[in-house]
Amino acid sequence: MAAFRSQGLAEPISGVNLVRFENVGVRYGSGNEILRDISFTIEPNSFQFLTGPSGAGKTTLLRLVLLSLKPTRGLISLFGSNVAELKKNELTELRRRIGVVFQDFRLLDHLTTYENVALPLRVQGKDESSYRAEVQELLQWVGLGHRIHVLPPTLSGGEKQRAAIARALIVRPELLLADEPTGNVDPSLARRLLRLFVELQKSGTSVLIATHDLSLMDQFDYARRMVLSDGRLIVYD
Amino acid sequence: MKSIIKFWENLFSHKEQRAALIPHNTVAGRSLVIVIAIMSFLASLTMGAVFLISEAAGNWSSSVSSELTVQIRPVMGKDIDRDVQVVANLLTNYQGLTDVRIISKKESERLLEPWLGTGLSLNDLPIPRLVLAKFSKQTKPNLAALKKNLEEKIPQASLDDHAHWIGRLVAMARTVVVGAIIILVLVLTAMVLAVSFVTNGTMSSNSEVINVLHFVGAKNAFIAKEFQSHFLGLGLRGGLMGGAFAAIAFLSSSQIFPLLSDGASGDQVNALFGSTSLSLSGYISIGMVSVLAALLTALASRLILMRHLKSLW
């Protein structure tokens, strides 16, 4: 753990917003806009919650940041680049600077915990010998050192959650997105996971957590709150 | 070269140091292999049949067009054996003809056996006799002059160079080959459609893998390479299985067929269908059908994958 943290998770960028949304709107098909005039920024080394009632569009907003969904209008800028002007490979390069923890984990069931966590490095074409120790160390850090060689179907909900978090962290992301990361774990583990995110933020990673757990947010009242309601976003700094 | 050997080693064994990114031995994957095997088996059988028919048709034409027949009709008061000998001598000394052969009475009996039955005495019937001769490869005989010469010496002899039969045989052979090729095209089209549909289904079952690879930062080229080689492997396994079964079927038939077609009727069947053993080019074409099935699977997976990736931004 010490070695992993001592290397630093990300180098904070000064002077550039990691994320900048300007009047972004999203509409599915010919229906009403589910997100309207969304404008906000995420600064380097910041910590924020994204909250709102179920169906408010939290996951949709995270998908916009992750570049898995195109907005129907507005401007999205990631790491200082207007994403509308980027080519596919450039978008992939930006995506590699973002770690994401999905609500449903999205671990590949035919790969072991180790292989799932190492996946982001493997797809970058890195040699396994260059990251084996690092992956094992990170798995120890999230408490899965004894579950390295098991397949996800045999992991508990909390273990899957931690494996998904480890996969998001292995690339030392500059921005971490987490969709309801405490939704499948007990309150005690939820607090531990939140503390992990706080540690990450202290190490230089900006964190955006989507949750509707108000009690959890109250424990970290210094964090910025972004509230989605009726398709609009209100930011409380 | 090393990568080809590694790919080949991995084709039939999954002992890779790193786990495959795309799950092996799934129900969808096995179904795809089975469908490819069945379709390539059918396509290979059709392809082999086209080769057999084409070769048989070629043999009919070449064997008939390389010889002539002189028929000597029996006439009251004339010694037919002497006439046969005169014709044989004439043909032997004629430029452009070789291998003159008199069809003996016994052979004539055997030829007529299927129609007139066994135990027949030709002495009781006015049966014409035949003399065969082959065309020389070096010089062409002047058939018009030969015909005139024959008419002068043995008026009851008639010359047949099989031109009429050759024309009909060639037309029939062409029709049969074209028909077989049409059936082959239909089978190959069915194979393309079946493999594309089943590949599409198999790709759908892997959509979660594609999404995860995409979101953890895999480039489209990387995902395409992984899926293409995975589906090429599945296609090769299915294609080679189907092709191998078809090759075994043709090898078996070439061994079994002669045993079943013995005797006089067997001779006729052999004359009609020729050899039932496939030539080397036939086996090579079966191999090509297998490779085609594999390439088709890889191509279909790539097209489907690219369409999916395009929808992901």
Image (cartoon, coloured by chain):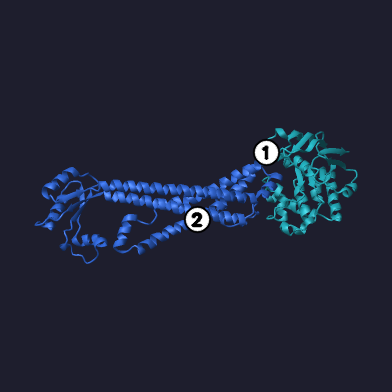
Chain colours: A cyan, B blue
Mark sitting on residue B129: none
Left or right of B134 on screen, residue B195: right
Residue B241 picture location, percent across and down: 51, 56
Residue B54 at x, y percent in the picture: 37, 49
Q: In terms of secondary structure, where does tag 2 sit?
A: helix
Q: Position of residue A108 (x, y in %)?
A: 70, 53
**Where residue A105 sits: x, y (%)?**
75, 51
Judged by depth in the image, the label closer to the viewer, 1 or 2, is: 2
Res. B2 in view: no
The three-letter amino acid code for the residue at tag 1 is Asn
- Residue at 46%, 47% in the rendered image: B185
Q: Decide: is A80 above or below B87.
A: above
The residue carrying pointer 1 sits among few (fewer than 14), some (14 to 19) or many (20 or more) residues within 10 Å by Cα, namely some
Number of residues whose C-alpha sits closer than 10 Å to that of mark 2, classed few (under 14), some (14–19) or many (20 or more): many
Residue tagged 2: B242
Residue placed under numbered mark 1 in the picture: A89
Q: Does the image show residue A27?
A: yes
| Residue occupying image coordinates x 50% and y 51% | B290
Residue A62 versus residue B49 in the image, above or below: above
Question: Which chain does the residue under circle 1 lie in?
Answer: A
Which quarter of the rendering shows the C terminus of chain B? top right
The answer to whether dots 1 and 2 both sit on one chain is no
Which secondary structure lies at badge 1? helix
